Image: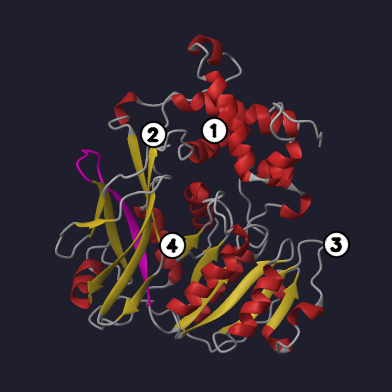
Amino acid sequence: LPSQPVNGSFSVEELLASPSHLVSEVQHMLAQMLHLESAEVADASMPTIVESVAEVVDRYGLAVHGASARREGEGWRLPFVANVFRRNEGRHLRRLAVFKEVLFQRALGIKDLDEEAQKLYEERARLVFRNMELFSEQKGHRLEARLVGSNGLWREISPTDKDGRTEASLWFKDEEVSKATQQVLSMSGSVLVEVRLIDRSMPPARVLLPLVGPEGVTVISDIDDTVKVTEVFRGHGKVLENTFFREFRAVDGMPELYKTWATKYGASFEFVSKSPPELHEPLTAFLRNAGFPVSSVHLCSLFSGERSSFKARRITSLLQEFPGRRFVLVGDSGEHDAAIYADLARRFPKQILKVLIRQVSDRHTVPSATFHGIEPGKWQVFTDPVDIRLDLPVKPALPIFRSLPEFPELFSPFDFAVKTLELQRPLHC
């Protein structure tokens, strides 16, 4: 890559290595472009984005992403994250054009995009730009949430931070959850939570949360190059190309493997990745459309000062939140999954049943010393999923939620993925 600065502030290498530098560069160019007349900016080089006027009923949008609900005392803890963003009006045209010019065309030489690649870029980059604000417009929004089908009462949650995000964790008694589960398409094992902005007329956003019991098997899986072809090991350019311009593709054999584990062992599935939360919607849709059973997806902000430790911290939290469950960790050799998982296996030997690492290429191997001190049968490096050896007690696909015996229906994690896909419609982009 060329080393000269794009505008005198940062080199291209610095832009690719640091998300904060990249944002500063884009914001600098945006500030310059704000002084231009719209006619000068909206030329033929700009992406074509058409929105229905009828859809723009409010300047803000609201997205909600849930995690697995867990038992706590005589009730259930329901965690979720809400994100307020500016709706994608014409204001995002400049951002899309600048980002494509600075990063993809100048730095990476990605040009001559076909119609499908251009469409994917517009859809995915807009998700990132809707949370990139120069003036912190999303800070301090007040929200409230309720459990659909219980007593119907709204509870106020913490206001949004400067990025428009807030994390919430509400507790409900067993009888409230029992009543709520009967409202979700007559399907036991999940509840529906609604979140809305206070004092605004826009409709609430909703999220379906799986109720994961205190015992059982949970698979914690990486996403990039473990279940989705991203090619991180080939560098930043290939990652950005596969993220913004290509349809997401599943790693051969992995959807079938996870579905087998869901039905054979009754496993739940937590996906933990350092991909940005702005891509939560397309990533989750990809996983479910590809046939992966999904309980929840955990992503890391590009601007977090703790990105390097995110995966270890999030997995540690899951292990502590579900002390009675047993875990299988699945990752790849393209980055640091093997070292992270090996350390966790040493710290939690009773909870972690096995570590599985997919070898992404002949050049990216995993030294056996990485797993020093861990029993040979508790870890495996594989290239083809059919070679994986996982011997667990066979358990039919029973309900994840098993604490309320009055529910007659059986339910598997794969069923949950299908029902979730039906309930959660794509948010306004």
Q: Amino acid at mark 1?
A: Glu
4 or 3: tag closer to the N-terminus? 3
Q: Secondary structure at mark 4?
A: helix
3 or 1: tag closer to the N-terminus? 1
Q: Is residue 122 magenta?
A: no
Q: Is residue 327 left or right of residue 10?
A: left
Q: Does residue 390 sit above or below 78 in this rendering?
A: below
Q: Does residue 145 sit above or below 261 in this rendering?
A: above
The residue that appears at 54% across and 85% down in the rendered structure is 351
The residue that appears at 43% across and 77% down in the rendered structure is 321
Q: Amino acid at mark 4?
A: Ala
Q: Which part of the image, by quadrant, shows the N terminus?
A: top right
Residue extending farthest to the front is 9
Residue 188 picture location, percent across and down: 30, 71
Q: How is the image coloured?
A: secondary structure
3 or 2: tag closer to the N-terminus? 2
Q: Amino acid at mark 3?
A: Arg
How far apart in space, not on screen, are marks 2 and 4 (Cα)?
Answer: 28 Å
Q: In the rendered structure, find residue 87 and report the number of the disc placed on it.
A: 2
- Give the residues in magenta: 198-212
| 1 or 2: mark nearer the eye | 2
Q: Which residue is mark 4?
A: 417
